[in-house]
């Protein structure tokens, strides 16, 4: 994945996840998707906010940092990602949202309008 604005690589090399039985849809506070894979969210989870977004493991995001707007970084023990995109590339371009709080499925959702995902 690349930041569309500056073309910096923002994820490790990822394969499209074909075996959806590997997705964790029930245990909150754990990874939704295994490391090394991405999936397009067809609306199965968080359809109101993240339908059509690219979902990856939190550990697979690189060359990124948290948003400079601290109001985007709420959460109890992680980041709940409910206040707009909370992750930016190294040049402060918004790329998506980390959800890593104890009551959520852990993932990074990348905004398809902000990242390029051709491999
Ligand atoms: Zn960028």
Image (cartoon, grey):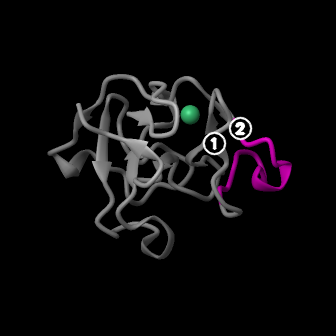
First in sequence: mark 2 or mark 1? 2
Query: Residues in magenta?
Result: 66-81
Which residue is label 2 attached to? 66
For the image shown, how many numbered marks are present on the structure? 2
Please say if the residues under marks 2 and 1 sit with CB atoms less than 8 Å apart.
yes
Please name whichever residue, 107 or 3, is drawn nearer the observer in this view of the structure.
3
Q: At which x and y percent is residue 66?
A: 71, 38
Rendered residue at 41%/60% (across/down): 26
Tell me the quadrant of ligand 1: top right
Quadrant in the picture for residue 60: top left
Rendered residue at 51%/39% (across/down): 5
Q: At which x and y percent is residue 51?
A: 39, 67
Quadrant in the picture for residue 11: top left
- Of the 4 image quadrants, the one containing the C terminus is top left
Which residue is label 1 attached to? 87
- What kind of element bears circle 2? strand
Q: Is residue 65 above or below residue 114?
A: above
């Amino acid at each position: 994945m690349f930041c569309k604005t500056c073309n910096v690589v923002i994820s490790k090399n990822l394969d499209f996840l074909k075996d959806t039985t590997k997705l964790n849809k029930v245990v909150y506070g754990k990874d939704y998707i295994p490391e090394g894979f991405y999936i397009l969210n067809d609306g199965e989870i968080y359809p109101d906010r993240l339908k059509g977004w690219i979902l990856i493991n939190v550990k697979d995001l690189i060359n990124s940092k948290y948003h400079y707007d601290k109001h985007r970084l709420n959460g109890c023990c992680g980041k709940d990602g409910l206040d707009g995109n909370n992750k930016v590339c190294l040049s402060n371009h918004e790329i998506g949202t980390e959800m890593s709080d104890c009551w959520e499925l852990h993932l990074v959702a990348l905004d398809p309008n902000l990242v390029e995902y051709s491999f």
